[in-house]
Amino acid sequence: MRYLVISDIHANLPALQSVLMDAAGAYDMVWCLGDLVGYGPNPNQCVERIASLPSVVIAGNHDWGVIGRADLLVFNTHARQALYWTQMELGEEYQEYLRSLPATVRVGDVLLAHGSVRDPIWEYVLDVHTAQVSFELDTFQVCLVGHTHIPLMFEWLDARNEVRILLPDWEAPVQLEGRRLIVNPGSVGQPRDGDPRASYGILDTDAMTFQYRRVAYPVEITQEQMRARGLPQRLIDRLELGR
Ligand code: ZN
């Protein structure tokens, strides 16, 4: 099976549509690692689109914020403003969909979590020490995470009992056979690694490979929609910077 691995769509429909078009024919099923909503202008359309696909979807911290499962006071000011707007905007059937999402899903040796193994909703895996905790708490071969909006891999080195960071290879697929990895596909709707293009990956469980991919989308359309909805300027500006 070939899985389209996406995360942190954040209600950015132009970005999601561009990824689905770019990946068309390259996957059999979607794995979505949470944060379908928050920040962006199209929460209803994004949840509807994801729910319409053959998919396994888990919850992120912004999804929990919208449905009242997370205290909005723990979010920063701009994120919180966007979440208040999203709560008013998101239809009841889509709120119900977000409520139905699990915090983790295991498919064979692959574990899906928005944040980390230790804290699937909130913990950011950005360094080898945090990654090591996840490797030691679980027996997964591959753990797919999002949340940081930064495409990155961590590999467990058994002989040395330590973890190393692997930067994404945008050209060649990464071989997964015989390795233990934490894989972050980056963010579809609000990349933060300095590249504004939508980031995602294709996991092929027959070939045992993960291919990182990047696709440009019309950032200015998303920005215009955010302006029209009165969403915070800082959130509008950061999309074209990829920060
Ligand atoms: Zn996010």
Image (cartoon, rainbow, N blue to C red):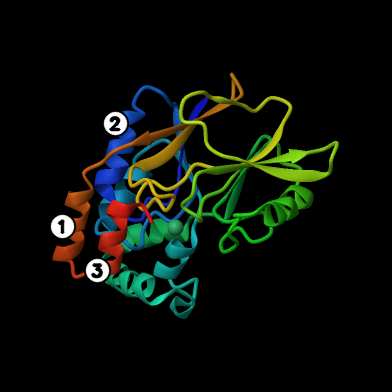
Residue at figure coordinates x 65%, y 28% from the top left: 176
Question: Could you tell which of marks 3 and 1 lies nearer the N-terminus?
Answer: 1
Q: Amino acid at mark 2?
A: Met
**Which of the labelled discs sits on residue 21, or is there none?**
2
Pointers 2 and 3 in contact (CB under 8 A)?
Answer: no
Packing grade of label 2 (10 A; few <14, some 14-19, many >=20) is few
Work out how far the residue at label 2 is from the one at label 3, CA to CA, in angstroms.
29 Å
Report the residue marked by disc 3: 233
Q: Secondary structure at mark 3?
A: helix
- Farthest residue in the top direction? 207
* Residue 192 horizontal/vertical position (percent): 42, 53
* Residue 56 horizontal/vertical position (percent): 49, 42
**Which of the labelled discs sits on residue 224, or is there none?**
1
65 left or right of 127 in image: left
* Residue 9 horizontal/vertical position (percent): 37, 50
Q: Amino acid at mark 3?
A: Gln
